[in-house]
Image (tube, helix red, strand yellow):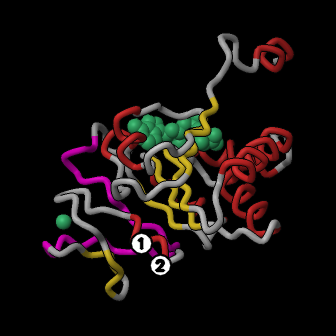
Amino acid sequence: MNPACAGGLRCPVCGRALAVFGRALRCAQNHSFDIAKEGYVNLLPIQKRHAAAPGDGREMVAARRAFLQAGHYDLFRSALAELCLRFAPQNAHIVDAGCGEGSYDQTVLAALAAAGRPAQLIGFDLAKPAVRLAARLAPQALFAVGGSFCAPVADGWADVLLNVFSPFAAAEFARMLRPGGPVICAVPTPRPLCGLKQVL
Ligand SMILES: C[S@@+](CC[C@H](N)C(=O)[O-])C[C@H]1O[C@@H](n2cnc3c(N)ncnc32)[C@H](O)[C@@H]1O
Ligand SMILES: [Zn+2]
């Protein structure tokens, strides 16, 4: 986990800023959230959980990780990185809402670093198994369990907001983005992966 990114988080209970205190993040109201050994933090309060294990399940997340790391979507990963290179300013703050297992974040951060423009990235997702994998894959970022409709990111922190194949939360995205900041959003076509489905 990158502690520098913690300044971009907000307490999911009272909305105040969070800061690192030892192995936890804490706000001025003393709401405290442990940092897991993998480096992520759970910022989804129990009252906002609509299921015992919200978001994609462990098997789905593992399958997506295997698929993406096998290179099948490298073209798409590169395209996302190119968009970030085009739109992110120097020392950019990037938020990935619904980040999944973090493969895209790994690519984006590597591309920006290779261009001499290292960025800070906060990714969050409802699915704890996904966030756990993301935190291991890209320890230079900060990953949290959190929901897009109650996002754990401070107002205006993001220079760029990524939203890849996951729910679009317009009001929260506008709140997190600096004024005029771009949203890089990927949505499926009306017949997603239809060539692949035909083969199967
Ligand atoms: C199709 S996956 C995409 C994940 C990742 N962006 C990718 O493209 O590999 C959709 C993701 O959205 C997450 N998700 C669903 N509802 C969400 C919400 N309200 N807030 C945040 N994440 C959510 C799921 O847990 C899942 O990881
Ligand atoms: Zn608080």
Is label 2's Cβ within 8 Å of ligand 2? no
Residue type at mark 2: give it: Pro
Whether 167 is drawn above or below 198: the answer is: below
Question: What secondary structure prevails in the magenta region?
Answer: loop
Q: Label 2, on which residue?
A: 3
Magenta-drawn stretch contains 34: yes
Whether 91 is drawn above or below 80: the answer is: below
Which residue does the image show at 22% across and 64% down from the upper left? 16
Whether 189 is drawn above or below 124: the answer is: above
Q: Label 1, on which residue?
A: 6
Q: Which residues are magenta?
A: 29-49
CB contact under 8 Å: marks 1 and 2:
yes
Most foreground residue, 44 or 52: 44
Residue type at mark 1: give it: Ala
Count of number-bearing discs: 2
Q: Position of residue 60 (x, y in %)?
A: 60, 40
Which residue does the image show at 43% across and 73% down from the upper left? 36
